[in-house]
Image: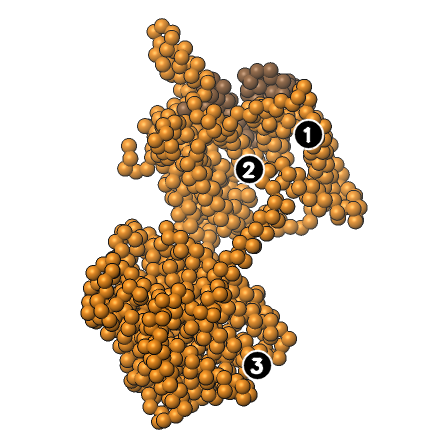
Chain colours: A brown, B orange
Amino acid sequence: MNVLVLGLAITAAQVLLGCAMMFAIFRLLRGPRAQDRILGLDTLYINAMLMLLTFGMQTGRTLYFEAALIIALVGFCGTVALAKFLMRGEVVE
Amino acid sequence: MTDSRILLLVLALPFFGSLLSALLPRTARTAAGLVAGSVAVLATALLIPFYAPVARGEIVRLEIGWLPTLGLDLVFRVDGLAWLFAMMVLVIGALVVLYTRYYMAREDPVPRFFSYLLAFMGSMLGIVLSGNLVQLAFFWEMTSLFSFLLIGYWYGNRAARDGARMALIVTATGGLCLLVGVLLIGRIVGSYDLDVVLASGGTIRSSPLYLPALILVLLGAFTKSAQFPFHFWLPHAMAAPTPVSAYLHSATMVKAGIFLMIRLWPIFAGTDAWYFIVSFAGLATLLVGAWAAIFQHDLKGLLAYSTISHLGLITLLLGLSSPLAAVAAIFHTVNHATFKASLFMAAGIIDHESGTRDMRRLSGLARFMPFTATLAMVAAAAMAGVPLLNGFISKEMFLAEALDARGGPVIGFALPVLATLGAAFSVLYSLRFIHQTFFGPPPTDLPKVPHEPPGWMRRPIEILVIACLVVGIVPAATIGPVLQSAVRSVLGAQTPTYSLAIWHGFSAPLLLSMIALATGTLAYFRFRDALNRRAGPPVIARFKGGRMFERVLADIVRRARSLEGLFGTRRLQPQLRLLVCLACLAGLLPFLQLGYATGGLPVTPLDPAFAVIWIVGGICAVGAAQQAKYHRLASLVLMAGAGLVACISFVWLSAPDLALTQLLVETVTTVLLLLGLRWLPKRQPEVWPDDRPPARVVFRRSADLGIAIAAGLGAALLAYAMLTRPLPDTISRYFMEQAYPQGGGRNVVNVILVDFRAFDTLGEIAVLAIVALTIFSLLRRFRPASESIEPPVQQRMQDAADLHAGGRRVGDTKKDYLLVPRIIMEWLFPVIFVFAIYLLVRGHDLPGGGFAAGVAMSIAIMLQYMAGGTRVVESRLRIRPLRWIGAGLLLAVVTGVGALAFGYPFLTSWFRYLELPVIGKVPFGTALFFDLGVFLLVVGATALMLVAIAHQSIRTPRARTPARPDVPPVIREEGED
């Protein structure tokens, strides 16, 4: 029973995360401002990380948490770089 | 002492010396001279003991297997002829090195010269010691290359550049012909091994491929040895420094062609084709060269043409196809090298000490430099063939052979007459050289007051002149045995009996020799004033080989340009269109012929989450392409999204290693692209009349869209067809099975990278280092587009706001911006560093490895740059990417070489479990060191690129001042603050 619940929950989470990614992609495409796109990208990264976590739970293999760890650790780099680029016009001053 | 492995040492020494010399500072001329001199002397000393077996008629061989299945082994062999030539190359080389030390001016970069010279010496030794014809052709081309560098040594001089180019094109083209000829010989004989080839002369001569092979090989030899009609490059090569002329263009390189003809004489000679082609070319060269030499006013020009003429003489002797003529040819080759090298050196001294080489301005120099004058006179007398000197003996042998030539009454009569004429010309120009330069009234309008050169500069000439005299007076006791062993190694059983002596009684050759001497002397005193007034040689001046060469070259270049205009384009779009269309066509053809069918494997059920992710990725990719032209930032964001989806796909499809690396690479890519974006010129959206693109543009874009869809669809169908079929049994199964037992790692990808295919990885990281260095050096001279030079508009606005707001100073906005994230970013440095080390260490067993770790580490560095800015980071953290790159490459190579020390092949890894205190049993392998090298190099290369781009921003203020438009950014290296 528990296994069934867990399986259903994971699938539901994946579907919901997939929806979240679709919404993020909408912002990514439409904008309208550059800030919206960057926020969209950041959201996409977070959702992808969570998606990997659910995938890891589903298969029970810890190997996939590594990828999630990397996104968590360095995934924000792109966002910061883009933010700096917008605010100051260049990434490294 | 005659271990055949010493041959390899003899050959390697010059190249090693060349490398060493290249590393010396540019003013270290004495040190470079010492290196070069000791290399030449040491190699000579190593080669001398080989005389004993060689004199017994043995062939010392050294074989090193390389590609045995293709018949390509490195074979070095020395026999009589090779020994004689190698000694000539080394001894004259040593003398030239001594001479060069005093010849070169203080401001010349002498180590570079010696570096080229030694490399040339090694290549030349490679030719004479090669026992494999392909290998010989390889060294042959190398001599062309280094001769090019040596002729163009004074590259500021236009004549030197042109001469170098001409020599390279002529001799390298000849070298290509030689290579093809050699391949033909290999086809006939079935082997490239020289000994096998030499033993199958009959097969070669009776083969239908004989004539093409002969012509191709001769083209190589004739271009190298400046034979008519390819002789024109040699006088142009006289723009080289005189030591080069003395070494390459009289004693060694031009003798390479002669050497080849002697070497292959036993298999090629004796046919009518050989007789007519080689004799005619030799005779024509002999006469044309001698005739032109008479009319030269430049000392080196005279010597160049006389060299051509003497090379023609040797070629003619070889063409005559009698064994005695071959003996004379070998003998004259040695004699010519001694007297011509000394004459070139004397000409160099005259030029050096009096400031001119023009014979019309020189006069009466014997007063000022009596020793040099005496030496030059003896050498010139040897060239003219005066008795008691070595030139006399070989010239007499030549005349005897001319008298004995076969081929009917016309040739029987014409050849001696023409030979005597050539000899008389030789007397004439030798006399003119000496008399014009050293005798007569004192010179009046010289740039310098002439005087004797330093004693050591004269010493090489003295040694060579003494050799001329000794060989000329007691030939049989000195050169006799060496010559005999050389002759026997070429002619074998055909070796004739001959006597080396100055007196053979009154004979026809002696008479001809005397006639030539008398005629030449008389002609000089009759015509010498007329000669000084003439501007060029009569009759043949109209045929200017050099001019024709230039015209042909210009023609080729023009045709190439028009072809390029017809088929080439510099615009990316047509190139890509062509490429993609061709790829589509190539992919389509097999399906058109054989039909398309999917395989039988069952299709995996669709995972809805995965499908959503892929839809997201697809939208991102298409959006990125669509936005790429006018909205780069949006396109970049979308690309990052597409990249993320690719990474997740890797995870999903069970490629964690790939996913890990790709995620890190994605991050770096985004930041590096953003860094570059700052410097791209702004693009103006095109404005068409009434805002609608013309039909032409619409059509082109729709066509491109169609091509893109077709290509994508094709690739997808191809992938589908492949994926629904069972995998064929590839090498991957072997790797999977052997990764742990042989490589000691459970991560197969990593074991393949650092162990099974480590050599590939080594090559790849070397390429990565080269790419990073290229980017670095390109960016040193980077000039941004005019609109990108100003600081970005945001910074200007914020600075202006700071300036006008009360209580704020300029730069406050910058300081406040991203304050919290900045602290986190700075604190993350050790965290990511630890993570990188973790990836590195566990890489052999679990996903990770040197590359991923290196990229992670460079992200840590990048974050610091983003957080603090270039100046702040570099005042705290010394990042020396160049060192990292060097250390990484070195470590990887040293690890690989370490395996050799234990008797295993290069890059064999070793592993075992170590018992460590506290931690316990841990796996340990040498592959880790290799991986560490990869890590260091990747960190260095990525950081170098990052730093190179980041430095553009702090460089801009200086770039705007017009006085120093391109000040390179300074990468912090040791000793700089």
Q: Which residue is mark 1?
A: B697
Q: Is residue A21 above or below residue B914?
A: above
**Screen quadrant of the N terminus of chain B:** bottom left
**Residue B271 numbered mark, or none:** 3
The answer for which chain carries disc 3 is B
| Front: mark 2 or 3 | 3
- Indicate the position of residue A8 as horizontal and vertical percent values: 68, 21
- Which amino acid type is marked by label 3? Thr
- Indicate the position of residue B586 as horizontal and vertical percent values: 71, 46
Task: Identify the image quadrant of residue B883.
Answer: top left
Q: Is residue B864 above or below residue B271?
A: above
Is residue B794 in view from this perspective? yes
| Front: mark 2 or 1 | 1
Q: Which residue is mark 2?
A: B657
- Indicate the position of residue B199 as horizontal and vertical percent values: 53, 79
The answer for which chain carries disc 1 is B
Q: How far is the residue under mark 2 from the one under mark 3?
A: 68 Å
Q: Identify the residue at image location x=77%, y=46%.
A: B591
**Screen quadrant of the C terminus of chain B:** top left
Graded by Cα atoms within 10 Å as few (under 14), some (14 to 19) or many (20 or more), the crowding at tag 3 reads few
**Which of the marked residues, 2 or 1, is nearer the chain's N terminus?**
2
The answer for which chain carries disc 2 is B
Q: Nearer the viewer, residue B53 or B414?
A: B414
Q: How far is the residue under mark 1 from the one under mark 3?
A: 68 Å
**Same subunit under labels 1 and 3?**
yes
Q: Identify the residue at image location x=68%, y=29%.
A: B697
Q: Secondary structure at mark 3?
A: loop
